Amino acid sequence: MSKLLRALQPYRARLERDLTTALHLQERSAVGGHVAVAALLALMLHDELETAHLAAWVGGILLACGFRAWNSWRFSRIEPARVAMRDQWLHSASILACGLAWSLGFVLVMPQLEVLSRAIVILILAGLSSAAVVTLSARVSSFAFFASAMMVPAVLSLAVRGSATERTLAGLGVVSLGFGFVSCLKARSLTLGTLLQRYRNEQMVHDLAVAKKSMSEALQRSETANKAKSEFLANMSHEVRTPMNGVLGMAELLGQSELRPDQREMLAILQSSGRDLLSILDDVLDLSKIEGDRYDFVQEPFELPQLLDELAGRHAVEAEEKGLEFVYDASIELPDTILGDASRIRQSLHSLLDNAVKFTDRGVVLFQVRALQGGPDGTTLEATIQDQGHGIPADQIESVFESFTQVDGSATRKHGGAGLGLTIARRVIELMGGTIEIESELGKGSRFVVKVPVEVQGRPRALATPGSAVLLAPPTEGTRRLAARLESSGLKVQTLQRASDLPADGQHADWLLVDRRAATEREIEQLEHALDARLIRLIDPVLTGVAQEDEAAVLRRPFKICALRKIFLPGATTADSASELAEAGPEPTTMEVLVAEDNPTNARIAERMLTSFGMEVRIARNGREAVEAFLERPPHLIFMDVQMPELDGMAATQEIRKLEGGADIPIIALTAHAMKGYREQCLEAGMNDYFTKPLRRADLSEALRRWQTKALRRRRA
């Protein structure tokens, strides 16, 4: 019982109210029972007792029952929360009066009763006392008051009379009273246990409701915070990209002018620093999209060799500047076209390659790509990036994929960065259904293996005629891998151990590949005279001094797929990547281009870049001016900034679409916003294409090439 009471201690005030309420709820049935028993008793004893005595006894009982009934009625009008100690006291007084009315009346009339009648009355009193266990068990004290008042005067009166029968009846009353107390204690324990369980259940329901409300409020706060964060990131992206467009755009224009070597070096640092800042900004935006489950993938066909070649070319130059050997070993038999998100694959591989070059001070960086056929999910693209850098301790391998984490997190760390590249790369690859595996040994380097399922749409083309001969001189680590790539494509590769060696008599080759690093110009000329073969010099990625007419006779490291196809595949295109096509610029046809841009610096940059392509450019400072310029003289092509005063780019586009009457002038969005959904909003507004600031000359070139034909056809129509 004590343990139960301790458990109920937190609910003490409520317990008192509920127990008092439980007592009053039983009063009506108790009063009704007492009135009925009193009436039967009067009928039974009216012949034995004097009328006055019987009337006094029964009248006292009825008066006490009336008090109990009034108190019950009064309590029923009280709100549960306002139950007080006074209500308990009044209840105790009413049941005490009722018990005394029964027992004192019996003491008064007992001398007039026969022994049998006395026994019957004692049994009636004991029965009423036992019945009170049900109605008064909520409080042991209430039962004690009632049972004691009911039985004690009657038992004492019988005990003092001295006869054996009367003492037996007194003993029976004592036993009945004791049994009633024991039963009341057990009933009270059950009552308290039931109340405790109810309190706990209600508390649990309350806690769940509070928790649900708290979770709902927390979710609402989280959604509000996420919305605020997204708006902040979008605004930050816009506010940073807008001035950076001016900085990098002007730097690119400046790079086209005559500069001293030291000035060109400072310009390169300026451009590199600006790109690094934008890269960090893009990483933060990407991480926010991934964490908010707002990361979208675009499933479009793209040319895989061009994507890989661009990555290899960029990082080969960076490796060359650090004195590293960058080995690009991509199978020539990779599929031409696959279906997927080119930008996300490029982003992930770039992060891994960037780290490999960054954390390697000497040695080799390997970039190997294969297409694994015949798996249950079709074709899997496998890319291996291996370096000879610092390596990663075994206990820190998993931490390299954690946000804002670098293995060397000290204040004196050598390499910078926000620590987001690998985090984003892994999550992006996993979201595409792929994996990233890592092996690393401290002091020896790391090896990352990326596997991504892809859908092949364009199969590779065979190089030259199977069995065509290639003579390679001399074999090095890089050229050995090149030889293996050529042999896997069906070419027959032979090697000369030294460039000074002459080929054997009768030795034939269709191509002669000579590593410029390991051969003098004299040795190359001797080999060229000794063989009736096409000479291809293998040169470094940044080697200058090669005449324009000789470019077709060189193969620059890192030996790109497109470059190999250009040499060995008849009829291959002369441009080996999209970047080269972009640099080449659009077809030399003059078009009138309207640029809607509210930032004067950005407008001037776009004007200068477009003018360099031979375009005639008009500038509109906001969306309203863009609509007016269109009405004055429709251009061939429109570059439309999205966020502008008076009338934004989307609204201006919608007005132009209404006014042009189906002419469908190409409108290209230029925006500093890079958050999810912005591209879709632009396209839904009627724009044809979308470019994110800062704008590069290559971006404008690509846009002009992409839309030039449609723009000119529309004007002729």
Image (cartoon, rainbow, N blue to C red):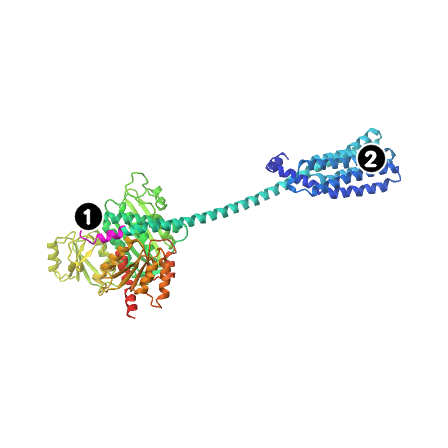
Q: CB atoms at circles 2 and 1 under 8 Å apart?
A: no
- Which image quarter is the N terminus in? top right
Residue furthest toward the bottom? 717
The residue pinned by badge 2 equals 106
Q: Amino acid at mark 2?
A: Phe
Q: Secondary structure at mark 1?
A: helix
Seen at 30% across and 66% down, the residue is 710
Helix, strand or loop for the magenta stretch, by majority = helix
Residue 400 counted in the magenta span: no
Residue 255 counted in the magenta span: yes
Residue 637 placement, left or right of 11? left
- Which image quarter is the C terminus in? bottom left
Q: Which residues are magenta?
A: 247-266
Q: Which of 485/295 is in front?
A: 295
**On screen, 434 above or below 44?**
below
Seen at 12% across and 56% down, the residue is 524
The disc placed on residue 137 is none
Residue 81 pos. (x, y %): 64, 41
Q: Amino acid at mark 1?
A: Gln
**On screen, 266 above or below 708?**
above
Residue 535 visible in the displayed image: no
